[in-house]
Image (cartoon, rainbow, N blue to C red):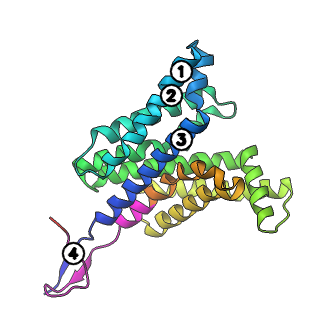
Amino acid sequence: MTRQVQPDSTASLHVLRLGAAMGMAGFGAITLQYSSALFSWLWLGHGWSESAAQGLERAGACLVIAAIPFLFWRRAWLAPAMASIWLAFSTWAAAETASWQAWLVPFAGATRVLAPAAVAVWAFTGPDKRLQGLLRVATAFTFAAHGVEALLGRGLFVDYAIGVLARVGIAATQSGAESMLRVIGVVDCASAAALLLPRRWRWLALWMAAWGFFTAALRMLHGGWAAWPESVVRLPNAALPFCLYLIWKPPCSKEPSSALCPTPQP
């Protein structure tokens, strides 16, 4: 007699933890090395002294970095939740100081902000529908925001496209890069919308994970090894949809004495 065995969720939890850790490490590195929008928002926007603004900014970055080990501690939730709150606060400050389409900033950073929160939620719920809903929304927001940025022809994206194509020996004009970005924007927005549908399309989650990893790696391809924090901070863009891909693995049938499928841990 055969029985249905649910896939083990250990791998998906490890992917989520690692993605959150990479995003937090990248955020900390960027803040400590180059400063962030929070410093400008406090110093120039709200009249804080330079030392006080820098001190709070660095303290927050250190808090986020210090929370990374707690991601891998079973049932730990407070430190990841606090890190997620600080990342949200920093993202809000970035939106307040952005000079181009500020309303897109919170959506574009949804995966890196919500990845630690997802680890905290997992400690209470496991990979249930609530957790999956959080992963879906965070991934969809980020992809939709990047898709809109591409459709609007964001100058930074145009520079990335031209620079990366040049590195692989392809000469691209600005108009050609903008046309390519429009196609990418449509695909990103369509993928985001499809991910929010009730259906579980594993292939879609896998595609979004691969594309998220590729676009994160583009920062180093464009800027060299010195740009590693810019790539690392965006790895949640790949980790969250890949986590969904693993969670959505269908159950398999097995005989009681068979070892074809892993036995779920209690």
Circle 3/circle 1 CB separation < 8 Å: no
Q: Amino acid at mark 3?
A: Phe
**Residue 9 at what x, y percent from top left?**
28, 64
Q: Which of the two discs, 3 and 2, labels the residue nearer the N terminus?
A: 2
| Marks 1 and 2, how far apart at CA | 6 Å
How packed mark 1 is, by other alpha carbons closer than 10 Å (few <14, some 14-19, many 20 or more), is many
**Residue 35 at what x, y percent from top left?**
59, 33
Task: Answer left or right for 56 relative to 168.
Answer: left
Give the residue number, with chain letter if any, for mark 1.
53
Q: Which residues are magenta?
A: 242-264
Residue nearer the viewer, 110 or 227: 227
Circle 3/circle 4 CB separation < 8 Å: no
SS label for mark 1: helix
Q: Amino acid at mark 4?
A: Val
Q: In what quadrant of the picture does the C terminus appear? A: bottom left
Q: Which of the two discs, 3 and 1, labels the residue nearer the N terminus?
A: 1
| Marks 3 and 2, how far apart at CA | 22 Å
How packed mark 3 is, by other alpha carbons closer than 10 Å (few <14, some 14-19, many 20 or more), is many
| Marks 3 and 1, how far apart at CA | 25 Å
Q: Which of the two discs, 2 and 4, labels the residue nearer the N terminus?
A: 4
Q: Which of the two discs, 3 and 4, labels the residue nearer the N terminus?
A: 4
Task: Answer left or right for 221 relative to 92.
Answer: right
Main SS category, magenta section: loop
Mark closer to the observer (1, 4): 1
| Marks 1 and 4, how far apart at CA | 53 Å
How packed mark 4 is, by other alpha carbons closer than 10 Å (few <14, some 14-19, many 20 or more), is some
